[in-house]
Image: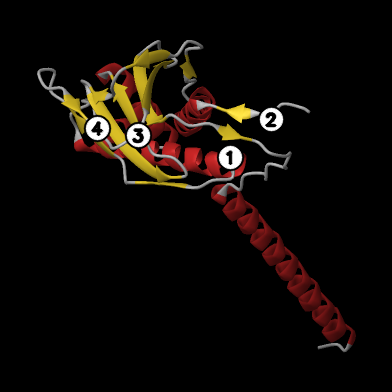
């Protein structure tokens, strides 16, 4: 009998890391990479200079913490704002700015949303999460975040930006394994932005066709009137 495939904590962490790199790289145009080595840690905590935590629950319970250095946060934030066409004089220059926290928090929200979508598609289970909130942390203060888990496992992964700035992702979750009982097809993920873009293109083409038909009808009417000498 063939051995059933088992999905472990490291597999789930790998899925989360892909969500981080895909979302941040796509949003900012900054090539984000993560280390092939993962570190086992005893607890997760928020560290300077700017961090965020997200709790999730459902098919499994866990906690995701991201800790950015000021340089990494500013590089990603500024690249993202430039990619959005924001003028340079309107882009914040300090990681202490509320705009930086708000933008990085929104990017984290997109990351967790992409992760929960991948979990639903690949593991056939559902998880929900709270709204992430980024906050700048004083170097003298360290905030620990705990959540109720039966047998928690904690991991830390190092990420590197295009300019070699560092940030960290920490994951704590119940010790669990997902065992595939039989093969199944993984549904292709649906990107809302792609759907909107396709619909806009379709509407534009339909409008062009209608305008072209109207122009041809007007031209035919003009020819007919000309033949009548009017």
* Residue drawn at (74%, 74%) of the image: 214
* Residue drawn at (24%, 26%) of the image: 50
Q: Are marks 3 and 2 in contact (CB under 8 Å)?
A: no
Query: Does 21 sit left or right of 92 as displayed?
Result: right
User: Toward which corner of the image does residue 101 lie, by quadrant?
Assistant: top left
First-in-chain label (2 vs 4): 2
Mark 4 vs mark 3: in front? 3
Q: In this figure, which residue is indicated by the disc labeled 3?
A: 150
Q: Are marks 3 and 1 in contact (CB under 8 Å)?
A: no
Q: Which disc, if any, is residue 214? A: none
Q: Which residue is outermost to the right?
A: 227
First-in-chain label (1 vs 4): 1
Q: In this figure, which residue is indicated by the disc labeled 2?
A: 4
Q: Which disc, if any, is residue 146? A: 4
First-in-chain label (2 vs 1): 2
Residue 198 visible in the displayed image: yes
Q: Could you give the CA–CA distance between mark 2 and mark 4, rounded to whole angstroms?
A: 33 Å
Q: What element does badge 2 sit on?
A: loop
Q: In this figure, which residue is indicated by the disc labeled 1?
A: 123
* Residue drawn at (21%, 33%) of the image: 135
**Pointer 4: residues within 10 angstroms few (<14), some, or many (20+)?**
few
Mark 2 vs mark 4: in front? 2
Q: Could you give the CA–CA distance between mark 3 and mark 2, rounded to whole angstroms?
A: 25 Å
**Pointer 3: residues within 10 angstroms few (<14), some, or many (20+)?**
few
Task: Count how many numbered circles sit on residues in the image.
Answer: 4
Q: Is residue 210 above or below residue 163?
A: below
Q: What element does badge 3 sit on?
A: loop
Q: What element does badge 4 sit on?
A: loop
Q: What element does badge 1 sit on?
A: helix
């Amino acid at each position: 009998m063939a051995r059933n495939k088992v999905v472990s904590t490291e597999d789930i962490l790998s899925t989360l890391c892909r969500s981080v790199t895909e979302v941040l790289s796509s949003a900012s145009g900054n090539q984000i990479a993560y280390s092939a080595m993962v570190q086992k840690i005893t607890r997760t905590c928020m560290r300077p200079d700017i961090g965020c935590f997200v709790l999730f629950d459902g098919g499994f319970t866990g906690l995701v913490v991201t800790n950015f250095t000021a340089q990494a946060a500013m590089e990603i934030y500024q690249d993202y704002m430039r990619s959005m066409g924001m003028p340079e004089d309107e882009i914040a220059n300090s990681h202490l700015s509320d705009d930086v926290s708000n933008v990085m928090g929104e990017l984290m929200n997109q990351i967790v949303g992409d992760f929960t979508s991948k979990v639903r598609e690949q593991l056939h289970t559902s998880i929900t999460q709270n709204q992430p909130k980024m906050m700048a942390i004083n170097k003298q203060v360290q905030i620990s975040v705990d959540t109720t888990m039966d047998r928690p496992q904690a991991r830390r992964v190092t990420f590197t930006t295009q300019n070699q700035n560092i940030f960290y992702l920490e994951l704590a979750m119940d010790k669990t394994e997902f065992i595939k009982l039989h093969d199944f097809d993984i549904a292709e993920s649906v990107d809302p932005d792609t759907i909107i873009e396709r619909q806009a293109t379709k509407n534009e083409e339909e409008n062009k066709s209608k305008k072209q038909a109207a122009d041809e009808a007007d031209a035919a009417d003009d020819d007919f009137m000309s033949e009548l000498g009017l």
